[in-house]
Image (spheres, rainbow, N blue to C red):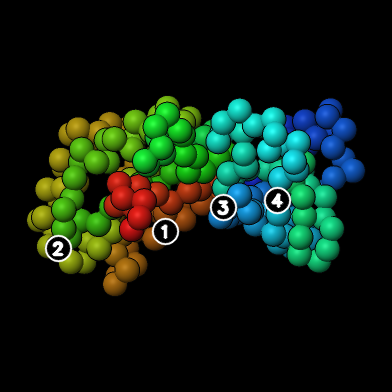
Amino acid sequence: MTLEDLGYNDKLEAFRIEHALTNFDVGRVISEHRERYIVRTIKGEFESEITGNMRFSAKSREDFPAVGDWVSLATYSSDFAIIHKILPRWSVIKRKAVGQFGEIQIIATNIDYAFLVQAVDRDFSINRIERYLTICNSSKVSPVIILTKTDLINELQLAEILDRLKSRIKHVPVIAVSNETQSGYEAINSFIKREKPVVCLALRVLENPHC
């Protein structure tokens, strides 16, 4: 595995050199839990914390690492590291934090495509999809609508849903998939590229973060 496999690019490397960070390792945050981070590097995965200086100087939650961030870090053992700096973000998917007035929750950063996933066999809602299309547009992320469980409805019902989507939502790819027949898988794979990070957003989970 190389850094490029994780989405690393020349602009990030130029920033790293310009800011004298070449003595640090570089990695990508792949998970976060209570200000503890798992960072994937070419050496492997490290459980990580931020420096005290980063914590002290942070003005808001957006100044902390998030899933998708590229960071410079120093490794201190075979599985532990300290994060020293967040490299520039080119996109941020965020929303208002639940139960915290004025706070922002970052869902993911440095994403090129967002798969908006919704099942068609129950409370299908175009309004819900449109809300998250707004988030994608404001986040500079290209959305792709993924309709799942299409094998649980008939062809006429699916055609009606697709017609409704296309009449209200323009210029956004819509892919209908079925786990049973595996139809639609090839279309999804066309968006998954080495240099183009993807985040999969299940709309029901975004509606209720406690799901």
Q: Are marks 2 and 4 in contact (CB under 8 Å)?
A: no
The answer, for residue 113, to whether it is visible in the render is no
The local secondary structure at tag 1 comes to: helix
Residue carrying label 1 = 186
Mark 1 is surrounded, within 10 Å at the Cα level, by few (under 14), some (14 to 19) or many (20 or more) other residues, namely few
In-front residue for pair 187/84 = 84
Q: Which mark is residue 49?
A: 4
Q: Nearer the viewer, mark 1 or mark 3?
A: 3
Say what amino acid the circle numbered 3 marks: Arg
Residue at 37 percent of width and 41 percent of height? 98
Q: Amino acid at mark 1?
A: Glu
Which residue is located at x 36 percent, y 51 percent? 209
Please tell me whether mark 2 or mark 4 is closer to you in this view. Answer: 4
Horizontal side, residue 51 vs residue 122: left or right? right
Mark 3 and mark 4: span between their CA atoms? 10 Å
What secondary structure is found at the residue carrying circle 2? Answer: loop
Residue at x-position 68% and y-position 43%: 70
Q: Marks 2 and 4, how far apart in space?
A: 47 Å
Residue at the spot of label 3: 34
Q: Earlier in the sequence, mark 2 or mark 4?
A: 4
Q: Secondary structure at mark 4?
A: strand
- Residues at marks 1 and 3 touching, judged by CB atoms closer than 8 Å: no
Label 3 crowding class (10 Å Cα cut-off): few <14, some 14-19, many 20+?
few
Task: Name the element at disc 3.
Answer: loop
User: Is 48 rendered above or below residue 109?
Assistant: below
Q: Nearer the viewer, mark 1 or mark 2?
A: 2
**What is the spatial separation of the Cα atoms under label 1 and label 2, in whole angstroms?**
21 Å
Label 2 CA crowd tier, 10 Å (few <14, some 14–19, many 20+): few
Residue farthest to the bottom, as pictured:
180
